[in-house]
Image (cartoon, rainbow, N blue to C red):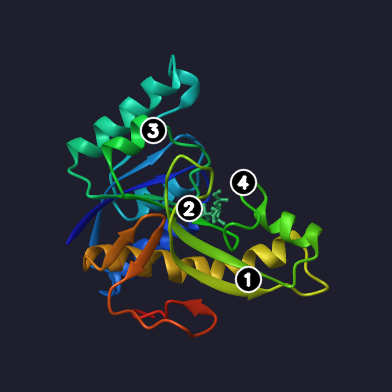
């Protein structure tokens, strides 16, 4: 059973997907703690409903970013967290944080990285006129929304799309690729070679998700 800590800032639909996939028995992980930098995050309601331990650590109550990150690291270490999952966590983590969890921090981003990094990735795809976009789970390094890619899903952009309709279409795949990536960590199948990540014995080469989903 992989012990995970989930960092959130808002709605928490990806957190919910993790909870549901664990409950269904397809994801062999336990959520040891959820940490939010936003006291109003709806993700916290989900924690209450599912009796998951949560903590709120606000940047504005922290004298420095180092202090803010030290508090989060302290909580994650006290819970013996083995994998840190950023699920809609809207802050950049420093090398101090990352050194505490080497190759053990992952993030979900609503684009095909390296396209449309940073904020409002769906709007960026629409404004650019991209015909495909998608979502990515990647290891976190010091770049913003960079780091070795674990899994990606391709999603079409339609002429009538709004930011909201496109975000919803992407989200359906986020909710699959994030639990799938965590399951691969749980099975110890994620191999890092330089800036690339591979999944041992995964099926590569299909659409719309590469490598192919196994638990959905
Ligand atoms: C998701 O679309 C996630 O990919 C995105 O924020 C949303 C959070 O939704 N993350 C980023 O843009 C990170 N750069 P959720 O709170 O419902 O999971």
Name the residue: 45% across, 51% down: 147
Picture quarter containing residue 198? bottom left
Q: CA distance from mark 2 to mark 4?
A: 18 Å
Q: What residue does disc 3 label? A: 95
Element marked by disc 2: loop
Q: Earlier in the sequence, mark 3 or mark 4?
A: 3
Residue corresponding to mark 1:
169
Q: Answer with mark 1 or mark 4, whichever residue precedes in sequence.
A: 4
The mark that comes first in sequence, 1 or 3, is 3
Tell me the residue that label 4 is attached to.
118
Q: Which residue is mark 2?
A: 12
Query: Mark 3, mark 2: which one is toward the viewer?
Result: 3
* Circle 2 or circle 1, nearest the eye: 1
**Alpha-carbon distance for marks 2 and 1?**
16 Å
Residue count near mark 4 (Cα–Cα under 10 Å), binned few <14, some 14–19, many ≥20: some
Q: CA distance from mark 1 to mark 3?
A: 33 Å
> CB of mark 3 within 8 Å of CB of mark 4?
no
Q: Secondary structure at mark 4?
A: loop
In the depicted structure, whether residue 50 falls above or below residue 216:
above
Q: Is residue 193 above or below residue 142?
A: below
User: Residue 64: x, y in percent?
Assistant: 44, 17
| Quadrant location of the C terminus in the rendered image | bottom left
Camera-side residue: 74 or 18? 74
Within 8 Å: ligand 1 and the Cβ of disc 4? Answer: yes
- Percent of width and height locating residue 10: 52, 45
Q: Left or right: where does residue 173 sit relative to residue 3?
A: right
Q: Measured along the vertical axis of the image, is residue 74 above or below residue 189? A: above
Q: Is mark 2 within 8 Å of ligand 1?
A: yes
* Alpha carbons under labels 3 and 2: distance apart: 25 Å
Dot 1: what SS?
helix
Residue at position x 49%, y 58% in the image: 13
């Amino acid at each position: 059973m992989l012990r995970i800590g989930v960092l959130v800032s808002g709605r928490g639909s990806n957190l919910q997907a993790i909870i549901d996939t664990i409950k269904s028995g397809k994801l062999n992980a336990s959520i040891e703690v959820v940490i939010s930098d936003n006291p109003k995050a709806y993700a916290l309601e989900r924690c209450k409903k599912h009796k998951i331990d949560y903590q709120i650590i606000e940047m504005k109550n922290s004298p420095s970013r180092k202090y803010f990150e030290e508090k989060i690291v302290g909580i994650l270490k006290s819970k013996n967290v083995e994998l840190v999952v950023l699920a809609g966590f809207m802050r950049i983590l420093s090398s101090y944080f990352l050194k505490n969890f080497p190759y053990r921090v992952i993030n979900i981003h609503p684009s095909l990285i390296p396209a449309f990094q940073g904020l409002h990735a769906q709007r960026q795809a629409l404004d650019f006129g991209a015909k495909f976009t998608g979502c990515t789970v990647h290891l976190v390094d010091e770049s913003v929304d960079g780091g070795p890619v674990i899994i990606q899903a391709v999603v079409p952009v339609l002429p009538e799309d709004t930011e909201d309709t496109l975000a919803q279409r992407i989200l359906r795949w986020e909710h699959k690729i994030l639990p799938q990536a965590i399951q691969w960590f749980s099975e110890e199948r994620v191999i890092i070679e330089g800036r690339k990540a591979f999944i041992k014995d995964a099926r590569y080469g299909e659409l719309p998700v590469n490598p192919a989903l196994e638990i959905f």
